[in-house]
Image (tube, grey):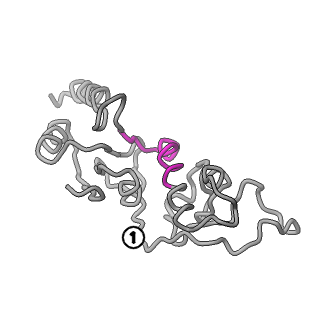
């Protein structure tokens, strides 16, 4: 599997997940929804990748929706227009409408990025480029993806692969309680 490839799979049962992981894995990252109904995923859908940015782009359907980070069409220095202080002068065009109702530290509805994203970039404001903002956005999104109702399994400690043990144990317990095992 290449570094930026992503796999999406519907895995409704623990045995399906284990078979998929054995045949196609292991992966550095695994993401699914914690909420029902899921947002930007099918029920029981998982996304797997060894690259977190590729995984998050797949979740957002970044390429499919032709998303692009652009300068927002306003001047943050213009104080005659009321807007939140934490809003940055960057936004994502074609932002997922499904996320407009989500509360997140890194964006507000319609894909306007917050100052939290820019605060992670170690460059002078006048030297920041689109690629810097994009990478900063995905770095910030990774840290707060659980705020949006997702479960993202990542490597822990010295492991190279997603830490599955506690998630799979809970899943197995749920399936036993439901009489599926």
Q: Who's the residue at 62% across and 52% down the image?
A: 122
Measured along the vertical axis of the image, is residue 75 above or below residue 32? below
Q: Which residue lies furthest to the right in this view?
A: 80
Q: Who's the residue at 73% across and 53% down the image?
A: 86
Left or right? Give the position of 131 relative to 81: left
Q: Which of 116 and 64 is in front in this view?
A: 116
Q: Position of residue 8 (x, y in %)?
A: 26, 55
Rendering quarter of residue 154: top left
Q: Is residue 45 visible?
A: no
What SS does tag 1 mark? loop
Boundaries of the magenta span? 138-153
Left or right? Give the position of 163 relative to 138: left
Q: Can residue 14 be seen in this view?
A: yes
Q: Who's the residue at 64% across and 72% down the image?
A: 71
Measured along the vertical axis of the image, is residue 140 above or below residue 82? above
Q: The N terminus appears in which quarter of the rendering?
A: bottom left
Q: Nearer the viewer, residue 119 or 25?
A: 119
Rendering quarter of residue 129: bottom right
Q: The C terminus appears in which quarter of the rendering?
A: top left
Residue of label 1: 63
Q: Is residue 139 magenta?
A: yes
Rendering quarter of residue 34: top left
Q: Who's the residue at 40% across and 55% down the image?
A: 53
Q: Does the magenta stretch include residue 52?
A: no
Q: Where is residue 93 in the image (x, y as percent from the top left)?
A: 54, 72
Left or right? Give the position of 137 relative to 155: right
């Amino acid at each position: 599997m290449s570094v930026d490839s992503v796999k999406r799979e519907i895995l409704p049962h623990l045995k399906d997940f284990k078979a998929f992981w054995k045949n196609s894995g292991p992966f550095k990252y695994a993401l699914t929804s914690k909420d029902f109904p899921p947002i930007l995923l099918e029920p029981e859908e998982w996304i797997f990748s060894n690259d977190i940015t590729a995984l998050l782009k797949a979740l957002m359907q970044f390429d499919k929706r032709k998303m692009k980070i652009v300068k927002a069409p306003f001047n943050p220095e213009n104080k005659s227009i009321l807007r939140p202080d934490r809003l940055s002068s960057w936004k994502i065009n074609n932002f997922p409408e499904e996320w407009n109702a989500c509360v997140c530290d890194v964006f507000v509805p319609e894909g306007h990025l917050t100052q939290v994203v820019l605060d992670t970039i170690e460059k002078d404001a006048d030297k920041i480029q689109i690629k810097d903002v994009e990478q900063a956005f995905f770095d910030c999104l990774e840290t707060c993806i659980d705020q949006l109702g997702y479960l993202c399994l990542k490597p822990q400690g010295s492991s190279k692969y997603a830490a599955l043990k506690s998630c799979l144990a809970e899943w197995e317990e749920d399936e036993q309680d439901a009489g599926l095992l």
